[in-house]
Amino acid sequence: MPQHLIQRGNNRQIAFFAEADYRFYLKCLGDAARKYGCLVHAYVLMTNHVHLLATPLERYALSRTMQHLGRRYVRYVNDVYRRTGTLWEGRFKASLVDTESYFLRCCRYIELNPVRARIATMPDDYRWSSYRCHALGMHDGLISTHGEYERLGNSAEQRQLAYQELFRTELSRIKLEQIRTTANQGWPLGSDRFKNEIEQALGRAASPPKRGRPADSTTD
């Protein structure tokens, strides 16, 4: 099951200082994902945090991937920049994602981060995300395409055009807040049916107590 993962720099400090850092991080992520069995579907590397959408293929695969990646990348940063101490803000945060209705919405959220942060006008202007792979067909050895993406069309060109079309409109404020909240608090992102299935499987609550207006659960 895919998970939306966020990892922030300690005290929201910078985690990437130069282009070489972004490249090395992506290499480390690819190495760790292959070693421990994770499929990376989408990503964006921002200056002080990272978003990933990934499916672990076995138990603990995601945790092991991130632990291996963290140790290797922090060691690299400390060596290159002659620093000591922690780089990341504790353990990463993650939420399960309902593939049927929310997978592509989560991709949009992740790959539009540079636009919302006003460091890019369009998502394809930003080099350190998976958007160009999904929308323009640029090779990215890190990306494993998901079934929801494959269902966008019968050919690569159809899928790319359909994916571009998803980005013609912005996510609503309610949908943005829903994705942020579930990721930061560790709640599943999905429909009520999806959350009920998670609750039955895990034997614990899969959403916070409802207050005020219900969150928007319609698909894009």
Image (cartoon, helix red, strand yellow):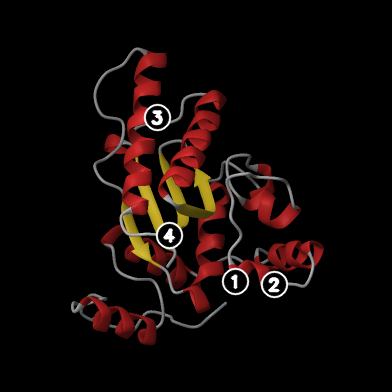
Tell me if residue 213 can be seen: no
Measured Cα–Cα span from mark 1 to mark 2:
7 Å
Q: Which residue does the numbered mark 1 point to in the structure image?
A: 148
Query: Residue 68: which quarter of the image?
Result: top left
Q: Earlier in the sequence, mark 1 or mark 3?
A: 3
Quarter of the figure with the N terminus: bottom left
| Pointers 1 and 3 in contact (C-beta within 8 Å) | no
| Pointers 1 and 2 in contact (C-beta within 8 Å) | yes
Residue at x 26%, y 46% (from the top left corner): 91
Q: Position of residue 141 (x, y in %)?
A: 63, 44
Q: Which mark is residue 73?
A: 3
Q: Amino acid at mark 2?
A: Leu
Quarter of the figure with the C terminus: bottom right
Query: Residue 216: which quarter of the image?
Result: bottom left
Q: Nearer the viewer, mark 2 or mark 4?
A: 4
Q: Amino acid at mark 4?
A: Leu
Is residue 28 placed above or below 79 in the rendered structure? below
Residue at x 46%, y 46% (from the top left corner): 33
Q: Earlier in the sequence, mark 4 or mark 3?
A: 4
Q: Earlier in the sequence, mark 4 or mark 1?
A: 4
Q: Amino acid at mark 1?
A: Glu
Q: Which residue does the numbered mark 4 point to in the structure image?
A: 57
Q: Secondary structure at mark 1?
A: helix
Taking the image as shown, residue 198 lies to the left or right of residue 5, namely left
Tell me if residue 158 can be seen: yes
88 or 199: nearer the viewer: 199
Measured Cα–Cα span from mark 2 to mark 4:
23 Å
Measured Cα–Cα span from mark 4 to mark 3:
23 Å
Q: Secondary structure at mark 4?
A: loop
Local crowd size for mark 4, using a 10 Å CA cut-off: few (<14), some (14–19), many (≥20)? some
Q: Which residue does the numbered mark 2 point to in the structure image?
A: 152
Measured Cα–Cα span from mark 2 to mark 3:
35 Å
